[in-house]
């Protein structure tokens, strides 16, 4: 997953004029109305700098609180960055408005809702102030407390707000407008990195940020006030200029994950932002004792599993903020390099940790992080069972033919999938050649409407499998030999949950297994994968697995990554080169990262026109893996 350039989008919406309502009328109307808050122009117009950040954070939390049981507040703000950066002229460039319009169509979830439209953050808070129990005020001097405040927001229905009392600040204006919203939890000045952690018997870690998270573990996670089945890894409230002096204070509110918080707050998730490494100090707090972040992260994961009695698969949303923290990537020229660890290395290490603690990732990653309204989407109904295309007839092997599989990836993040759907799934050439779509089924918890849409509009050439598994996970760390943790064998827990999702969506394949730092897949992991994906398993390049049959299932390592910027001409030449190098009778497997069906269809067409003598066939994944195991054994 790669970072991408920030884009700004300014669009207009025609608003229906509304009559001012009394508080009692508002309360009555709210019980049957969806409030639509359009921030595309008003967020930066009505607020600036830190106040805009604080307004966005408040809106995300407000959504999570009020949408917990049913859809009541919808936000329009985020562009479809994936489409815009690629120059696609999609009909609706605002992802929030695309999904709103889609859900408003006849027969869909929001079709019968009465709509109240506003552009005013304060009006939205006023409409739902009775749902709020007060404020959780966080400490600017300890940015981690912004995440602590988000955890408390979900646990106690409090609005998380920066503790800036200056005239004109978001907090001062909030107090003026809503004096009834009192501060219930004040995190300012509580965490000093010395002595004892407040309200606990624990000695300070020597890190203010880690003390704040351990305080939250003791007072919210262990006590059951917050949830233990959902974690949220989103960048904290740090001023980016403290890391890179020539960076903006805050870059963009979508990639900060502020709007993503709604879903996780609705689930009462535990929020954090910690380096996974124990051999270096965290780059955002270089004065901390070496490894304090990594040890604190392990404590959170361990305690969540203990609360769950070690029998639950945990979902963690978000991703390592590698572009600004914890790696040697330089966000700007002024970014000091405080670690030797590289971005992908850090991603894999974090995934390894989660996997060792019964946790899968919903990996909202750099550049395309932003996704609002999942607290609304989660209520979209799903069928009990979906049926995919029948298993194709076994293919006959021809020694002179090269067999191709295109794996459509990386759909291991709800944020990525929600932006890809309007122009990749709805691509006009989808259905012309067989494609293997790798979509982790855990994403259905956040974007169920996409699974319903995809599985009810399959062409005969579409096959839906998982990306890495139930979620982003390293199978080497699920079983008995659990490096990084002392948890019991997690295979039974993982398989029980994963099989439920696979069965519901009629999945039988996994497209892109990553074992990362663990190198070659263990026999235990291969057996687990074969049990979960009897239709076939694809592996990332370099994972050193033998192509062929394992436990009665076809396994194949990919040849190459084809990223989204590959043109059809480039694809045709890449495919030609691989066929020529490998020779006839071989099996080729390509990871197509956010590539459209049109790119592949045109690439194949160009190659057939240029080299009509080449014999190659693009196969359905079930036919491909079946033929592979019969030929390779």
Image (cartoon, helix red, strand yellow):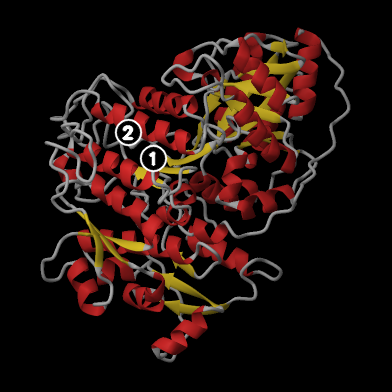
Label 1 close to label 2 by CB (< 8 Å): yes
Residue under the point 49% across and 47% down: 415
Looking at the image, is 85 positioned above or below residue 515? Answer: below
Find numbered disc 2 in the image and state the secondary structure of the residue it sits on. Answer: loop
In the depicted view, which residue is nearer to us: 91 or 633?
A: 633
* 367 horizontally vs 499: left or right: left
Q: Quadrant of residue 556?
A: top right
Q: Quadrant of the N terminus?
A: top left
Residue under the point 77% across and 46% down: 386
Pointer 1 local density, CA inside 10 Å: few below 14, some 14–19, many at least 20 = many
* 165 horizontally vs 78: left or right: left
Q: Position of residue 499 (x, y in %)?
A: 69, 34
Q: Earlier in the sequence, mark 1 or mark 2?
A: 2
Find numbered disc 1 in the image and state the secondary structure of the residue it sits on. Answer: loop
Numbered label attached to residue 322: 2
Looking at the image, is 500 positioned above or below residue 626? Answer: below
Q: CA distance from mark 1 to mark 2?
A: 8 Å
Residue under the point 60% across and 32% down: 467
* 334 horizontally vs 159: left or right: left
Q: Position of residue 613 (x, y in %)?
A: 76, 18
Q: Residue furthest front?
A: 201
């Amino acid at each position: 997953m790669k970072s991408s350039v920030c884009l700004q989008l300014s669009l207009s919406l025609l608003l229906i004029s509304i009559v001012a309502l009394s508080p009692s009328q508002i309360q009555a109307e709210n019980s049957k109305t969806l409030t639509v808050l359009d921030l595309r122009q008003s967020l930066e117009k009505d607020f600036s700098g830190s106040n805009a950040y604080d307004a966005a954070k408040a809106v995300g939390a407000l959504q999570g609180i009020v949408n917990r049981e049913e859809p009541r507040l919808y936000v329009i703000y985020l562009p479809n960055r994936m489409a815009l950066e690629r120059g696609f002229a999609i009909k609706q460039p605002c992802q929030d408005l695309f999904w709103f319009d889609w859900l408003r169509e006849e027969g869909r979830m929001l079709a019968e809702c009465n709509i109240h439209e506003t552009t005013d953050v304060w009006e939205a808070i006023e409409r739902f102030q009775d749902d709020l129990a007060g404020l959780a005020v966080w400490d600017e001097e300890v940015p981690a407390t912004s995440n602590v405040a988000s955890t408390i927001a979900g646990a106690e229905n409090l609005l998380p707000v920066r503790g800036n009392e200056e005239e004109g600040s978001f907090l001062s204006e909030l107090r003026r407008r809503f004096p009834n919203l009192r501060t219930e939890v004040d995190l300012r000045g509580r965490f000093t990195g010395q002595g004892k952690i407040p309200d606990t018997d624990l000695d300070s870690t020597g890190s203010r940020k880690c003390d704040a998270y351990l305080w939250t573990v003791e007072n919210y996670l262990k006590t059951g006030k917050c949830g233990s089945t959902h974690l949220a890894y989103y960048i904290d409230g740090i001023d980016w200029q403290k890391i890179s002096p020539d960076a903006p204070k805050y870059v963009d509110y979508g990639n900060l994950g502020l709007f993503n918080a709604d879903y996780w707050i609705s689930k009462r998730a535990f929020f954090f932002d910690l380096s996974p490494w124990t051999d270096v100090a965290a780059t955002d707090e270089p004065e901390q004792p070496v490894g304090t972040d990594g040890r604190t992260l392990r404590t959170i994961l361990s305690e969540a599993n203990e609360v769950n009695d070690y029998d639950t698969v945990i979902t963690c949303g978000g991703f390592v903020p590698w572009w600004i923290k914890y790696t040697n990537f330089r966000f700007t020229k002024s970014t000091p390099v405080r670690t030797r660890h590289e971005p992908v290395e850090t991603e894999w290490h974090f995934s390894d940790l989660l996997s060792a603690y019964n946790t899968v990732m919903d990996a909202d990653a750099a550049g395309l992080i932003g996704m609002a309204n999942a607290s609304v989407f989660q209520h979209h109904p799903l069928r009990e069972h979906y049926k995919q295309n029948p298993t194709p007839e076994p293919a006959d092997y021809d020694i002179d033919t090269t067999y191709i599989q295109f794996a459509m990836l990386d759909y291991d993040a709800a944020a990525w999938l929600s932006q890809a759907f309007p122009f990749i799934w709805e691509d006009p050439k989808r259905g012309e050649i067989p494609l293997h779509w790798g979509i982790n089924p855990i994403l259905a918890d956040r974007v169920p409407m996409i699974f319903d849409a995809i599985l009810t509009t399959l062409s005969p050439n579409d096959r839906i499998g998982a990306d890495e598994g139930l979620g982003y996970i390293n199978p080497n760390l699920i079983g008995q030999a659990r490096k990084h943790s002392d948890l019991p064998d997690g295979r039974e827990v993982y398989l029980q949950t994963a099989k439920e999702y696979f069965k519901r969506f009629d999945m039988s394949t996994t497209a892109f297994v990553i074992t990362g730092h663990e190198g070659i897949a263990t026999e235990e992991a291969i057996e687990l994968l074969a049990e979960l994906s009897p239709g076939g398993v694809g592996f990332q390049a370099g994972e050193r697995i033998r192509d062929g049959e394992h436990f009665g299932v076809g396994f194949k390592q990919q040849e190459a990554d084809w990223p989204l910027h590959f043109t059809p001409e480039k694809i045709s030449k890449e495919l030609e080169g691989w066929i020529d190098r490998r020779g006839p009778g071989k099996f080729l497997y390509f990871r197509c990262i956010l590539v459209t069906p049109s790119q592949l269809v045109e690439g194949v067409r160009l190659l057939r026109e240029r080299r009509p003598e080449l014999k190659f066939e693009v196969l359905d994944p079930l036919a491909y893996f079946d033929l592979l195991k019969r030929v390779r054994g």
